[in-house]
Image: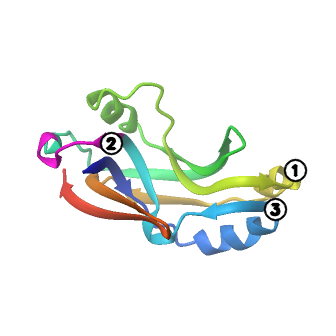
Amino acid sequence: MRLFIATPVTLPFYQIIKSKLSPFIQGKWVEGYNLHLTHKFIGEDNPDNWKIDLKIPNEKIEIKGFGIFNNKILYMKANSPHIDAIAKELNVKNFTPHITLCRIKTFDKKLFDELKKLSFSHNIEFKVCLYSSILTKKGPIYKKIYTY
């Protein structure tokens, strides 16, 4: 089974972001119900191997600011003092906490100006879950298997 560990994310302003940035981006926007902060992509494995004891803090994760990875991924930044601690527990290297918004095919350079104009922030519950991921032609289907 294809697995990953993530925090589910709900962004109440996601449709506004999409409508403001879509004129400048050609690509695949993540469905709102699939937004998440990935802590570790596992790949093919038995879910029972990942029902482990993670130390999940009782705090909020701040979602604020935008970034672009390699001109291919538009994302929102995630910040919490404990995100790095979980990455370390899961043995994840070079971790950049983020929520993928769009997989970019092409974009207009005016996108960078538009990103500077946008100012959104939101706090989400620090909840961490094990998910299965099934890839389909219509997009991925994620299913929560376990909550840490």
Q: Identify which amino acid the numbered label 3 is placed on.
A: Phe
Residue topped by disc 2: 43
Please report whichever mark, 2 or 3, sits nearer to the chain's N-terminal start. Answer: 3
Residue topped by disc 1: 109
Please report whichever mark, 1 or 2, sits nearer to the chain's N-terminal start. Answer: 2
Q: Residue at x 72, y 43 (%)?
A: 71
Q: Identify which amino acid the numbered label 2 is placed on.
A: Gly
Is 6 drawn above or below residue 138 in the view shown? above
Question: Left of 13 or right of it: where is 3?
Answer: left
Q: Residue at x 33, y 52 (%)?
A: 126
Distance between the Cα atoms at labels 1 and 2?
34 Å
Q: Identify which amino acid the numbered label 1 is placed on.
A: Lys
Display colour scheme: rainbow
Give the secondary structure at mark 1: loop
Distance between the Cα atoms at labels 2 and 3?
33 Å
Q: Residue at x 81, y 58 (%)?
A: 114
Residue topped by disc 3: 24
Residue 14 image offset from top left, x and y in percent: 59, 69
Please report whichever mark, 3 or 1, sits nearer to the chain's N-terminal start. Answer: 3
Q: Residues within 10 Å of mark 2 (few under 14, many from 20)?
A: few
